[in-house]
Image: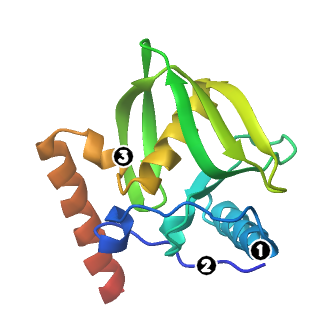
Amino acid sequence: MAIRDILTAPDIRLKQKSKPVEGGVTDAHRALMDDMLETMYAAPGIGLAAIQIGEPLRIIVMDISRDGEDKAPRYFVNPEILWASEETAPYEEGCLSVPEIYDEIERPARVKLRYLNYHGAEIEEDAEGLFAVCIQHEMDHLEGVLFIDHLSRLKRENALRKLKKARKEAALA
């Protein structure tokens, strides 16, 4: 396992659409998911899409366990949302690819999804609460969408300006 570099906005690679995993989940995919999980924990974060480490594949890792709880890693290969509730819920989101920026995003409160797990088994399950927020956030990455793309143009431009300023300050340090 290895910790990989996380791409940050406005890196153009974050805007590309990820390709489906073909031919089932292989050892190479599992090795990638292991690296992604280690990278996510080290960041620290609760979710990571493969594109965030420069791999344009439809793979997500997640662990929404709370501090003090046992780790509960989850793996999603080729996830798809089968149904989303009309009811929405706001949640303050952040992103490892948009560091230090947080804002409230409105998303469907519940979704039903289908995906392949770490071992390649097909799973269907319902998600709500933080799980629903996180899976939708990470699935946006697979489509080349960042959470700040859901914000007004002014808020998005302010967020990108803050990122560029922080990057300049880090380069000078």
Residue at (54, 78) in percent of width and height: 5
Q: Quadrant of the N terminus?
A: bottom right
Residue pointed to by mark 2: 4
Left or right, 6 with reference to 38? left
Disc 2 to disc 1, C-alpha distance: 12 Å
| Name of the residue lying farthest toward the bottom | 172
Vertical position of residue 112 compared to residue 159: above or below: above
- Report the front residue among 94 and 139: 139
Residue pointed to by mark 1: 31
| Name of the residue lying farthest toward the left | 154
Q: Position of residue 151 (x, y in %)?
A: 24, 39
Q: Position of residue 51 (x, y in %)?
A: 49, 66
How many other residues sit within 10 Å of disc 3, few (<14), some (14-19) or many (≥20)? Answer: many
Nearer the observer, disc 1 or disc 3?
Answer: 1
At numbered mark 3, what does the secondary structure look like: helix, strand or loop? helix
Q: Position of residue 138 (x, y in %)?
A: 51, 48
Res. 163 image quadrant: bottom left
Res. 69 image quadrant: top right
